[in-house]
Each structure stands twice: as C-alpha cells, then as structure tokens.
Image: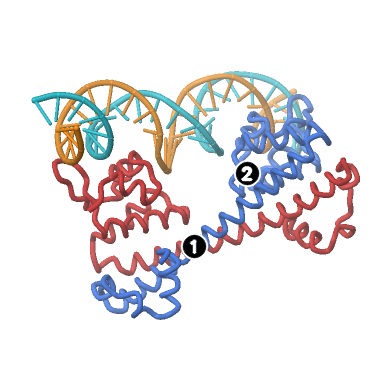
Chain colours: A red, B blue, C orange, D cyan
Amino acid sequence: MYTIGQIAEKFDLSISTIRYYDKEGLLPNIKRKNGIRQFDDQDLEVFLVIECLKKSGMQIKEIKQFLLWVDEGNSTLNKRLEMFKNQKQKVLNQIKELESTLNLINYKCWYYGEAVKQGTDENLKTLPVLSMPKEIQNYYKKAHKI
Amino acid sequence: MYTIGQIAEKFDLSISTIRYYDKEGLLPNIKRKNGIRQFDDQDLEVFLVIECLKKSGMQIKEIKQFLLWVDEGNSTLNKRLEMFKNQKQKVLNQIKELESTLNLINYKCWYYGEAVKQGTDENLKTLPVLSMPKEIQNYYKKAHKI
DNA sequence: ATAAAACCTAAACATAAGTTTAGGTCAAGC
DNA sequence: GCTTGACCTAAACTTATGTTTAGGTTTTAT
C-alpha cells in the first residue's frame, strides 16, 4: 500500500496533480481509509500507463475514456487494442517530425558555428546551397523540403 | 511580397495566429502599407524558424528572445549558436523519450492483440515476463525499466 | 462607383492542465 | 494529550496559446 505522497515521489508528480487526476476520473477504483487514498500495486500499473499515454500526447479526457474501457471489461478489448495501435502511429509521426525539425536545427548549428568563426553571418546569408558542406546541404534540403 | 492570408496558407497557420505572433513580438520588422502587413522572402525564413522552434517545444517568449538577438546583430551570434545547440539536445531527448514511450505502447499492442485473440486478458494479467515472446520481453523490460 | 473580400485593432473569451488557497481532519511521535 | 506532518475538499487562480467578436478600413473586381 502506498500513500499519495509516495506515488507522487515514485512518478515525479505533485500531490495536487494526483488529486486532480482523481477528480478528472483517471483513478476510478481508488480505495480509501477514513477518506485517505490508498494505492496498491495495480494502481502503480495505472500510473505507468497514464504516464505513457501522456508522454505520447494524449489528453486527460481520452486517457479517462481508456480507463473506463478497462473498467468495462472484456467487451472493450478491441477498442483498447485499436487505441494503442492508433497511439503507436501518432508517436511514430511525432518522432518523424522531430527528426525533420532536427535537420533544420543541425543546419542552424552549422550556420551559427561558421558565423561565430567569421564574427559575422553576412557571408552566410546569401550562401548558395551548393557551396555548403555536403552533409549540411542535405540537412538544409530536408529541412526546407527542396 | 505576400499578404497575411498567403503566409497563413503557406505555413498552415490561421490569420489570427499570425497577428497574435506579431503582437507577441515575433515579427519585429514587418513592413506595412496603409496599415496592412507586407511580408517578403526574408520573413518567410523567419516563419520557417518560428515553425521549427515551436515544433522543438520552445515557447513564444523564448522565440521572441531569439528574434531580438537576430535584430541585435553580430554581437549575439554566440548566444544564438548556444541556443540552437541547446535546442538540439532537447530535441534529441524528446526523441529518446518518445522511443521509450513507444516501447510500452508496443508491449500494450501485443498484450491487447493476445487478449482479443483469447477474448479475455485474464490469462495475461499475471503472465510472467519470461513467458512473453522474446521481442516483447525486451519492450516490456525497457518500458518498465527492469 | 459600389459591393464583396481581405485586411485592421482591441478586448473578451476559450481551453487544457494544472497550482494555490483556505479551512479543515487524521496519524505518529514525544 | 498534544503537536506536527501528511492528508482531505472545494473553489479560485494561473499560464500558454491561441480564437472570437465587434466595429472599422482597404483593396479588388465588376
């Protein structure tokens, strides 16, 4: 059994965030003793999933829907599978987008690296793409979609 | 020269979002004709960078700071370089975190795939890690950090 | 010349995801 | 038994990032 403070520590959440999650319906089956919440190992698993779904960009109310499906039992297994498949695709897309963002950032790192060396970026502003180092050319082209 | 509507279309932003960015100081040097904003090719580059920095998770006011540095000229080249290096690290960390999130999602896809096949997840709930398929074992272990 | 479409500002409103506050109850150690 | 620390609720507040509204001006096409 864990107190709210112990859960907060384990998952690096504030106590009021956990109370907020409870209020929003993310912890439908929490036991209480004299009004005080008591968490068990099954609840740990719930917090792990909440953390995962949040990190994947899901909103509180969508997570709540998932947890309601869990409560409904076997009849919702398919919905839950579809939800995770869908979320997997979203995460893959986010990773792709971040990798493309990284291209432009890498180009900018090169650009400002050169600029700092030269003390100015005047010469770089009008630099033709083809005079960039080949690796940076690729970054630039990917980032600018050319 | 581009109108605000053309920029909105090009960057898939709403017109009011562009006005909001302007109000927040992200477009310090916009020309106007009879009060109407006029964007040129240099501004396109600014929107590209804004898009990039936003996708990398930077807040409006931090982006504003960067654009102020651009305005200040060569004396801030080093700050700008450091900013991009820092942002690069942040993006790399985000990608890592998403990949770790993906591990748990992959495990859950497998879990619910099995559950749907069986019509129940009763047998899976208490499944020892070592009886999972090897590939899923690794997902599970990475996701649960064991 | 006029109507429609596109632009403008200022200010109010919206939303998600918490955090803070005020006023209380419960439990552990001295 | 009493104090201190950890817990409780309800409700107000916060912050970031826009969006919407109301009322007006400019440009464009006919």
Please state if B52 lies on the left or on the right of D16 as rendered: right
| Residue B17, horizontal then vertical, whole percent | 61, 37
| Residue A107, horizontal then vertical, whole percent | 76, 54
Q: Point out which mark residue B13 bears.
A: 2
Q: Nearer the viewer, residue A67 or A76?
A: A67
| Residue B132, horizontal then vertical, whole percent | 36, 78
Q: Is residue A132 above or below residue B47?
A: below
For label 2, the crowd category at 10 Å Cα-Cα, with few meaning under 14, some 14 to 19 and many 20 or more, is: some
Secondary structure under the numbered disc 2 in the rendered image: loop
Q: Is residue A17 above or below residue A64?
A: above
Q: Residue at x 61, y 33 (%)?
A: B20
For disc 2, the chain is B
Q: Give the alpha-carbon distance from disc 2 to disc 1, as whole Å.
A: 31 Å
Q: Nearer the viewer, residue A140 or A42?
A: A42
Q: Residue at x 28, y 45 (%)?
A: A4
Quadrant of the rendered structure where residue A35 is? top left
- Going from N to C along the chain, the mark reached first, 2 or 1, is 2
Identify residue for label 1: B100
Please state if A123 lies on the left or on the right of A25 as rendered: right
Q: How many marks?
A: 2
- Check the picture and name the quadrant holding the C terminus of chain A: bottom right
Please state if A125 lies on the left or on the right of A89 as rendered: right
Q: Between label 2 and label 1, give the one nearer the viewer.
A: 1
Secondary structure under the numbered disc 1 in the rendered image: helix
Amino acid on which the number 2 mark rests in the picture: Leu
For disc 1, the chain is B
Amino acid on which the number 1 mark rests in the picture: Ser
